[in-house]
Amino acid sequence: MPYSELLAPIKSFLLCETPDEWINEAKKPERLPLLLIDHMICELKAGQTAMWLIRKYAVDKASGDALLEWVKPYEDFIYRKQGNLASLNSNKNDLKKTIIPKEGSRYGQSLIDKMVLLIKEELHHFYQVLQIMEQRQIPYENIRAGRYAKGMMKHVRTYEPEALIDKLIIGAFIEARSCERFAKLAPHLDDELNKFYVSLLRSEARHYQDYLALAEEVAQGSVNERVEHFARVEKELITSADDDFKFHSGVPNC
């Protein structure tokens, strides 16, 4: 397994590894188009989540609108099938405005610093996946979302700042699972995809650490109890039978 030192804290954070049954399904050549499409959508969703957190908790409307404008070309491609690789390249990582925290926000600057970098990296990964798809003549098609993120979000508390803390912890688990799954799947793929997925490990590992650090900053203390709760929820989603097959799905039952 590449980057064993980098993966060690992630393996201790997650309560289980990706089941072999998922790997056996994922490495089938006919599954590659679906995996790449879902991966690309996941990169956008990760960027959207980070943007939503900044807009809701950290900035004024003008800064929020600048973030929306930044992500819009990628949303247009996924939801409205507008644009292409060339138009996304001309717009790539083009945040035209300095994002400034609201006055009096205790954690606003930390949230902006970590999440703007995350958005930039996720949009770059989106572009890289689309590039691979075009090279392999894999067309983009709309697919329905899997159960994973929704299954985690059902456990978010409904009052603040606990709701924010829970959402940040969920972000940590999504990034950690992505990192673990990239690493476990990579050896079963062709050389180009192997190198690509291994290249993503370091940023995914940092994203999970950034989310956890933000959760602790907002909580002003330990979040271990909630981490343990979501670890159990996440394990159940990963190890139980799943009628759908996606990048973050459970044991294939299809």
Image: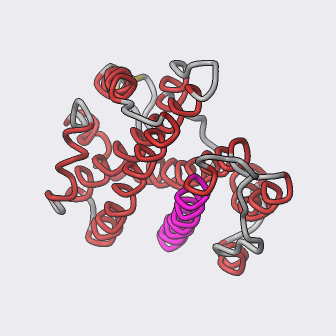
Q: Position of residue 216 (x, y in %)?
A: 43, 39
In magenta stretch: residue 114: yes
Q: Residue at x 23, y 41 (%)?
A: 24
Question: Magenta part mainly helix, strand or loop?
Answer: helix
Q: Residue at x 17, y 49 (%)?
A: 8
Image quadrant occupied by the N terminus = bottom left
Front one among 137 and 208: 208
Q: In the image, is 221 to the left or to the right of 19?
A: right
Asked if 56 appears above or below 209 in the picture, the reply is above
In magenta stretch: residue 109: no
Q: Position of residue 28 (x, y in %)?
A: 30, 48
Query: Could you tell me if residue 247 is visible in this image?
Result: no
Front one among 221 and 133: 221
Asked if 3 appears above or below 161 in the picture, the reply is below
Q: Position of residue 141 (x, y in %)?
A: 63, 50
Q: Quadrant of residue 154?
A: top right
Boundaries of the magenta span: 111-137
Image quadrant occupied by the C terminus = top left
Asked if 188 appears above or below 242 in the picture, the reply is below
